[in-house]
Image (cartoon, rainbow, N blue to C red):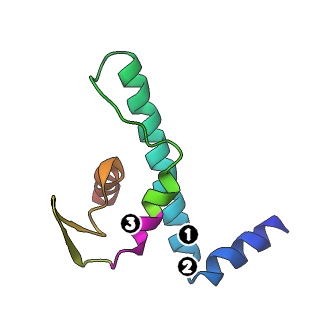
Amino acid sequence: MATKKAEVKHRALGLSDEQALEMYWHILLARRLDERMWILHRQHEIAFHISGIGHEGTQVGAAFALKKGYEWQRRAGSVSRDERSGCVCAARRRRDAR
C-alpha cells in the first residue's frame, strides 16, 4: 500500500518514474558526498567544509525545476539545469561520461 501512495504522489506532480528515480539518485549522491567531505574535514585532509546535510531534497528539487538546457543568468555567472551546483554537478557529469 505504501508503494501505491508513493506512486500517486510523484505522478500527481507530473513526474515520471524515471524522473523520480533520477532525483532520488541525486539526493543520495549529495548526501554521500557531503558525508565523505565531513570525514575528510575531521581527518584534517581538507581545510574547510560547510555541510548541507538535510538540504539535499531542496537542492535537487530546485535544480530539477529549472528548464533543461536553458542558461540562467546570475551575479556569479550562469547556471543551467545540465550544470547543477556543487558536487552533484561534478558527479553527474562523471556518471554520464561512462
Q: What's the CA distance linking mark 1 and mark 3? A: 13 Å
Query: Regarding mark 1 in the picture, which secondary structure is present there?
Result: helix
Q: Position of residue 43 (x, y in %)?
A: 38, 15
How would you classify the magenta stretch by its main secondary structure?
helix
Residue type marked 3: Ala
Query: Regarding mark 2 in the picture, which secondary structure is present there?
Result: loop
Q: Quadrant of residue 39?
A: top left
Residue of label 2: 15
Residue of label 3: 63
Q: Is residue 7 left or right of residue 50?
A: right
Q: Residue at x 44, y 47 (%)?
A: 30
Q: Is residue 44 left or right of residue 18?
A: left
Camera-near label (3 vs 2) is: 3
Q: State which region is magenta.
A: 61-67
Q: What's the CA distance linking mark 1 and mark 2? A: 6 Å
The reply to whether dot 1 and dot 2 touch (C-beta < 8 Å) is yes
Quadrant containing the N terminus in the rendered view: bottom right
Residue type marked 2: Leu
The reply to whether dot 3 and dot 2 touch (C-beta < 8 Å) is no
The foreground one among 74 and 44 is 74
Q: Return the mark for residue 20.
A: 1
Residue density around tag 1, few if under 14, some if 14–19, many if 20 or more, within 10 Å:
some
Q: Residue at x 43, y 58 (%)?
A: 59
User: In the rendered view, would you say 39 is above or below 84?
Assistant: above
